[in-house]
Image (tube, coloured by chain):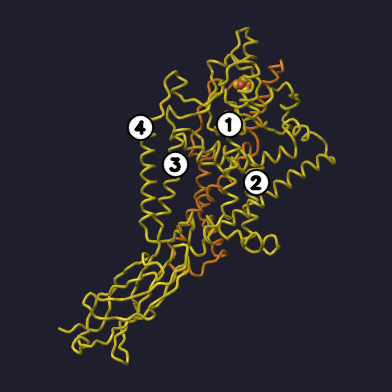
Chain colours: A orange, B yellow
Amino acid sequence: MSDDHTSEEIQAEALLRQAAAKGLGSRPGARLVAITLWASFLGAIPMLLTWLLLLPEEYAATLGLAELSFGFFMCWLAAAAPAAIAALLTQAGSPAVPLPPEAPNEHLH
Amino acid sequence: MSTSTKPPATEKPGLLYESSAKIQSRRAQGRYARLRVLAMLLLLGFYYLAPWIQIGDTPLVWLDLPHRRFHVFTLTLAPQDLIFLTWLLLIAALTLFFFTTLGGRLWCGYACPQTVWTEAFIWMEHLAEGDRYARIKLDRAPWGAEKILRRGAKHLLWAGFALFTGLSFVAYFVPARELFPEFFALQLSGWPLFWTLFYGFATWGNAGVMREQVCKYMCPYARFQSAMFDKDTLVISYDQKRGEPRKSVAKLGGLPAGDCVDCSLCVQVCPTGIDIRKGLQYECIACAACVDACNSVMDSVHKPRGLIRYTSAHEEAGQKFRLLRPRVIGYGLIWAALCVGFVVAILLRTPVQFDVIRDRHSLYRELDDGAIENLYTLKVSNETSAAHRFKLSVSSPDGRRFLAVPDSLLVGRGEAQALTVSVRSQASDDEHEEEGLHGIHSLKFSLVAEDDPKLQRERSASFIAGEAHD
Ligand code: SF4
Ligand code: SF4
């Protein structure tokens, strides 16, 4: 095992910093898009199922993969609106999100 | 138990803390890593094989969306069975809640598709590019034949696996035995091809590129599952009392060192990039990679294992771990009741749905032979795994005779049919009786499968035969 423990400690801290800043961690815009796409995708699945199960038999008879795919994209689009609003309102800096209390030694950094 | 995670002496720290260096997590090896691999093999094995397994001539799992039939383990669910689907979803949610209360983030660590596919992608990366140190070296190396070959091999493996995953996903909706031959004959087109590429791309993006970021920033379950935790829920935790002051801190302060040798292996193996020594964090997916890593370090420094381990808040505070507690018993009872109820309901359910609707557009018609005719729409859905010919008969409680035309119909497995049927009053031997056919009569429609009389349903409907006579 390396004796240079300070270096190990620095290495661990560097790994943590990099992990925190990696990808979406340092890109709030991309994070917003990713969250919206994923949340609305999850919402679109039960929406599609509900639509499919409640559809009267006479309309369902003409269903194919093309209609279903179109239906799914409509559901996704419909779910994207509330998902985007929720993601926007919970972004740091939004008036809906109170600022975190300042740490006692924050001014030192 | 043998673990093969080597202490970092064999590895040069290099310039890892340079901001330009890409993070390469180390693969942990040990008891929990083997458990994760086992879970991955079982779950992915099921995912890829299920569309190929047939029971009779129906796949084990086939979500036939255009026909609105869900074939799951010999069970065929139709829109009328919405209640069963809801019930299944409730059971799935309760299973998750129950096991989360009991064992913490077991789902995240071992069974979530994100974890399972990421594990498979990391395994392929390891195969093509080598271990962590080799990957760091490859990252820093200029582009040359080896780098192109290794990177190319990794992306080829990923792309092939992602494509196979996408095809297998579509095989849950389009039978695999039709889909795969079409794909290999380069005849797959339209929406099946689109969804294959879409799902394949999503798998590649989520498991190959995004990885832990999905858990950290996008997964809603990660955020609300702590609501199911109590002080006896299993969590992964670092034993502060035993580990601190860690070796480097002790050395600086001239204190006797705790058991943590500050090797940072627990940080290097962590797929979400956290330091468990700083306490429990929501990013921790409880994969136990740090447990394996730290155990191997403890073995090499001849200290007892378990500096990082599965524990509970109560156990950490020196109290006894309680397996049975009110919340677990509550979830467990509801879960068991839902499961038993579901099985009973499925056993009691008739897999033939039958409905009779009188034609709203015509009241009745008098035929040339004097018989009265009413029209009905019959809806029959056969949710069994075989086609059946059904015999239709119509009777009246007052003994009058009626004839249904047609009086039999063939319904394929998993099929629903809507059929217009004419019901006619039969000429009676009794003159007075025939004359008396007026007003509204109640009819009983009986449907029986010719090859299986247990499959039968009855419905009532009205028969209109003109104005009632006083
Ligand atoms: S801290 Fe959590 S996520 Fe990281 S390695 Fe340990 S168990 Fe896995
Ligand atoms: S907790 Fe274990 S693995 Fe982590 S730094 Fe300390 S000794 Fe190494």
Q: Which secondary structure, mark 1?
A: helix
Mark 2 packing: few (<14 Cα in 10 Å), some, or many (20+)?
Answer: few
**3 or 1: mark nearer the eye:** 1
Label 4 residue near ligand 1, CB within 8 Å: no
Who's the residue at 51% across and 35% down the image?
B106
Q: Depth check: give the residue in front, A66 or B69.
A: B69
Residue B202 placement (x, y as % from top left): 62, 49
Q: Chain of mark 4?
A: B
Give the number of the disc on residue B74.
none
The C terminus of chain B, quarter of image? bottom left
Inter-mark Cα distance, 3 to 1: 22 Å
Give the number of the disc on residue B205.
2
Inter-mark Cα distance, 4 to 2: 42 Å
In the image, is residue B365 above or below residue B104? Answer: below
**4 or 1: mark nearer the eye:** 1
**1 or 2: mark nearer the eye:** 1
Residue A100 placement (x, y as % from top left): 51, 30
Write down the residue under mark 4: B326
The quarter of the image that holds ligand 2 is top right
Residue A109 in view (yes/no): no
Mark 1 or mark 2: which comes first in sequence?
1
Specify the amino acid type for callout 3: Thr
